[in-house]
Structures are given as C-alpha cells and as structure tokens.
Amino acid sequence: MNLKINHRYGANKIVDVAYFNNFTFNLKYGEIASNFGFNFYFDPNDPLHAELACVSHFHEATLEHNGETLLTGFILSQGFNKESQKQLASFGGYSKSGVFADCEIPTDLYPLQSDKLTLKEICERIAAKFHLKVIVDQSAVSQSNGVAKSIKEKADTVIEKSTASEAQNIKSYLTELTTQRNIVLSHDEFGNIVLTAAKTNQKPLFHVGEDEGIPATNISMTFNGQSIHSHITVLTQASSKGGNAGEYTIRNPYCPVAFVYRPKVVTMTSGDDITVEDFAKQVLAAELKDAIKVSVTLDRWDINNKLIKPNNIITLKSRENFIYNTTEFFIDEVSYNGNEKENTCVLTCVLPEVYNGKTPKNIFVNPHENLPRL
C-alpha cells in the first residue's frame, strides 16, 4: 500500500509517506465516500513531518495499491500521544465526496427548489461548488417498471420540480432523488460523484464456506428483524399535471408469518404513479440492506492478483450461519487492514436484491428442505 500526501493543496507538494503502519481503509459501493486511517511515526523536530501532520490543514491524500489509485480524499483527523515510549500518531479521513454527508447546500445556490433540471444538472450544480465532477456510468442499466433503462437516460431526464430542505445535508437530498429513480449514488477513486447501477448479474468472483470454497478465517451472518416490516405502503401525491394521488403496497418476504403485522408507510415526494412500484421496491431494498448482512474475513487482499473490491458477487454456503444452500451475495463494502506482519480484509455482503430492483425471495424460509422437520 502506498500513501501520498499533498501538503500544499493547489501547489501539488506531494510526498510519498514511508513511515506508516496499522493501515485501514474501507471501500464502499452504495455510499457517497470511502474512509481510511493509519498510524504515522511523527518527529516534531522534522520540518517535513510538521508539514505532513499539520493539524487543521485538511491535506489531500491518495491511496495506491500495486500502482492502482484506490481513493483520493482529505485527512480530517489527527491524534497525538506522548508516553515514556515513543507513540505513533493517528490520522484519518475520507474521499473528497464525503463532504456531502457533512454539509448542507450552500446559501449561494438558493433557492432550494429546482425546476426543469435533469438529475445530472442538479448534481453538477452542487458538485461544482466543491470542485468535484459528476460521472454518469455509460454502461450501467437498471430496471424501471419492468423496462431496462440506461443510467444515462435516467440522469438526463428532466425533473419538473425538486425541493431540498434547509436542514437536509447534500448526501440525503441527492440520495432521495437517485433512490426514487433506481440509481445508485456512489463515488470513484478520485473522489468524484458517480451515478451508476450495481453489477449483480456478473459471474461470482469466488465461493466461500462449505463445498471447497476459498479459506476464510471468519464468516458471520446477522438478521435484524427490527428493521423489517411486513407491509410497505407508498403514498403518492397528486401531480401538478393533474395526476391522481395513489398508493401501492408491497409485501416483505422476510416477514412471512401472517400473524406478524409490522406495517410501514412512506410518502414519495418526486415522480408519478408509474414509478410508485419501483419506489416501493427501493424502500424494501433499504430494509434488507440494514437487516441482512454477511461478513467474511480473509487473510488476503487479492484474488488472482487482483484486489477484492465492492460491486462484485460471491457465493456462500455456511450451515453454521443458517445458509443451507449456496447463495449469491453482493460485496457492498471491503475493509482492508494491514501492518508489517499481515494483510487481512473483511467483506460486508448484502443480498443482490438490495441493488438490482428485483423482488427478493426469502433464503431462510425453508430450512426443512435440508433437515427433517421437528
């Protein structure tokens, strides 16, 4: 892992940092930013160290692995400690696009209502204030009302009216717009905003668990029923063009017992009647993302000499984790950890239906197909 710090932003005073350890960074797919942290040997008497570690300067940092740029962002935090033995200083930060999660729309971009702008134009108008670009994935396709549409077509479609809240951060506002259009709001290795769709139909990267999978040091699965609702109802408001208000209800297959009634009601603030079904699926997908997670810990970063990254599929079978059949999971996040002794990574995986817009099928409901019924 190579770490470069630009301690004169705009003047490009870039330094390859040699003395760092206990490195961690997380690549996240369906998020506005990834984050990183490392420990650094800080000599307060070294002028270059004082430049690199300067508190409150928000230095630009670049992470590279085998010559490939993985993350470009800013150092946000520093921690120093003095004891009888020399201690390493700690540093942390996130992708350049992470500022969208911390900040509201600046007042010089008011009014907060946008009329007859495309999604791309709305994103570009905000991103330009932060010196960021908006990248539209030209090859990505997602489903809308059963019809495959390119992300480019969706990003270039005019939105009649869209209004942000004064108290709403930029990430929340843009996520609201993209989710309703079955678009994933993400970021690239240079910190730019990316409008894309997940690649859930690709060939699995590898198999893990039982049946001769690659070795894992730990596999865990969690199911949080508190995040699950039995019925999700989406309400739509009457449109300015005279469209009728309406509602649509979708059943959550991960709450299959008829006696268990856990309703959820949400209001769609943008779109029209023909998109209400897609929006309901997105609300369901958000629940599944929170409720069902698989964690896989590996003793490596690479498979076939390529870094394991999010936006890939793996297959998993682990009866100890109540996954009796070989099941596909989507890599949503990878946390990489490294020191002078070893490199390890932790994959956080979710169901593919979290991103592909398809109606999910309960992977747990029929365990008795594998074991005798009690």
Image: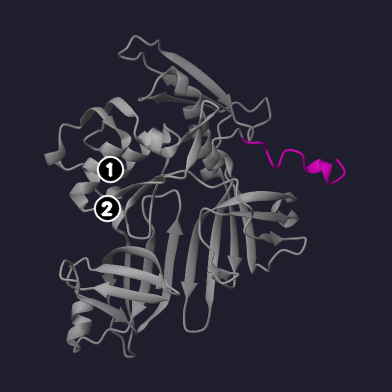
Q: Give the percent coordinates (x, y) of residue 46.
A: 20, 88
Tell me, yes or no, whether the two marked residues, 1 and 2, touch with CB atoms within 8 Å.
Answer: yes
For residue 168, say whether it is visible.
no
Q: Give the percent coordinates (x, y) of residue 3.
A: 35, 75
Dominant secondary structure, magenta: loop
Quadrant housing residue 346: bottom right
Residue for point 57% across, 46% down: 200
Residue for point 68% across, 29% down: 257
Q: Nearer the viewer, residue 138 or 68?
A: 138
Q: Is residue 371 left or right of residue 8?
A: right
Question: Which amino acid is tagged 1?
Answer: Ile
- Which range is magenta? 360-374
Q: Is mark 2 on a helix, strand or loop?
A: helix
| Coloring scheme used | one colour
Q: How many marks?
A: 2
- Whole-Å distance between the Cαs marked 1 and 2? 9 Å
Q: Give the percent coordinates (x, y) of residue 247.
A: 47, 17
Give the residue furthest to the left: 108
Residue for point 40% across, 34% down: 153
Q: Was residue 361 drawn as part of the magenta stretch in this picture?
A: yes
Q: Is residue 172 left or right of residue 65?
A: left
The mark nearer the N terminus, 1 or 2, is: 2
Question: Which amino acid is tagged 2?
Answer: Val
Q: Which residue bears the numbered disc 1?
A: 170
Q: Is residue 363 above or below residue 73?
A: above
Q: Was residue 198 drawn as part of the magenta stretch in this picture?
A: no
Q: Which of 235 and 4 is in front in this view?
A: 4
Q: Which residue bears the numbered disc 2?
A: 99
For residue 337, say whether it is visible.
yes
Q: Quadrant of the C terminus?
A: top right
Q: Is residue 24 left or right of residue 361?
A: left
Q: Give the percent coordinates (x, y) of residue 319.
A: 75, 54
